[in-house]
Amino acid sequence: MLEIELSKEKFYIPENWSEVPIKRLPKLLESVFVAQATPETYHQILRLSLGISESTWGRFCYHYFRKDLPENTRDKNAEILHNLLMMVSWMWTEEMTTRPFDTVKVGTEEWVLFEENLTSMSFGELSDAYIHLLAFTKQLIEGDERLHHLIATICRPRKEGDYTLDTHWNGDHRIPYNAHAVKEMSKKVALLPEGTKVAIMVYFAGSVKQLFEQYDLMETGVESVGEDDYPGQGLIKNQHLLAEKGIFGNLDQTKQANIHDVFLFLEEHRKDMKAQAENQKAE
């Protein structure tokens, strides 16, 4: 946290997403990623970042920018405001890789967000969620339909019973992923506050980027997991190629394999293929 002083009062500005209090996070994310970039929006972002009420922020604005102040004083105060905005400029560039909240209330149900670093996510779930993310950001279908599909894919109700005692438990607190249930579940997601939906999307987007950066997979070719002719083509292609080779079993078993196990295999396979190609050139 950065400590600053306004009107002889001390305030603290967060330096990363993890330092933003949970209660202010959804509205702040909505202001950064959804709202139009207007002076009012920037004031809202600063106010939420500082944890100041609307009435207090209005008092500050009057104190620093009232009309009876000399023009040079108002100019200096405008520079202070600009510097404050620069202190939170990281919000437009820094990925969120820690959970903004553990659970979210969807109707009468408690839905659980996926684990950090995608530790328990399956290859099939990651592939479907990534496709929904790209389809939404590119607006292949106008509106929020694919955003709702994304959230219904990666957020699900908590499992019942003493599942943590199961020796085969993989650390996932959510009920198993079912691609066919996403459409119905997404109808419930549509009722969530906009800021909550944005928080989940930003968390997933940051987690996916972090995942791709962990593994050396981004060259073109069989091992590519990046976007190609259509969203998620590389991931879908690898599902079928791995299933054909039986590395993780058939196609359904491949989709159920842990994403880190799959990416680790693809990375090692890419290294082997690269070394083989270099040996052939040397010969």
Image (cartoon, rainbow, N blue to C red):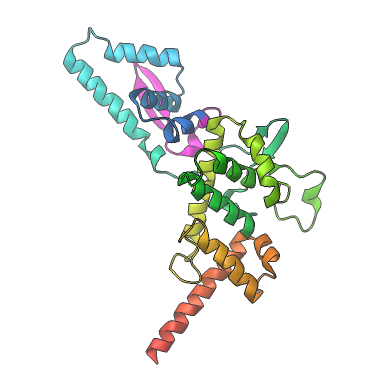
Task: Using the rendered view, name the quadrant where residue 255 is placed.
Answer: bottom right
Give the image location of residue 84, x and y in percent: 33, 28
Residue 132 within the magenta-colored segment of the rendering = no
User: Is 174 left or right of 198, judged from the image as shown?
Assistant: right
Residue 99 appearing in the image: no
- Above or below residue 7? Residue 42 is below
Q: Which residues are magenta?
A: 1-26
Give the image location of residue 6, x and y in percent: 35, 19
On-image quarter of the C terminus: bottom left
Which residue is at 73% across, 42% downward?
158
- Above or below residue 270? Residue 66 is above
Give the image location of residue 193, x and y in percent: 57, 29
Give the image location of residue 20, x and y in percent: 49, 33
Task: Using the rendered view, name the quadrant where residue 105 is placed.
Answer: top right
Q: Nearer the viewer, residue 41 or 96?
A: 41
Q: Nearer the viewer, residue 263 or 226?
A: 226
Q: Nearer the viewer, residue 239 or 180?
A: 180
Residue 183 appearing in the image: yes
- Above or below residue 24? Residue 141 is below
User: Is 163 left or right of 199, judged from the image as shown?
Assistant: right
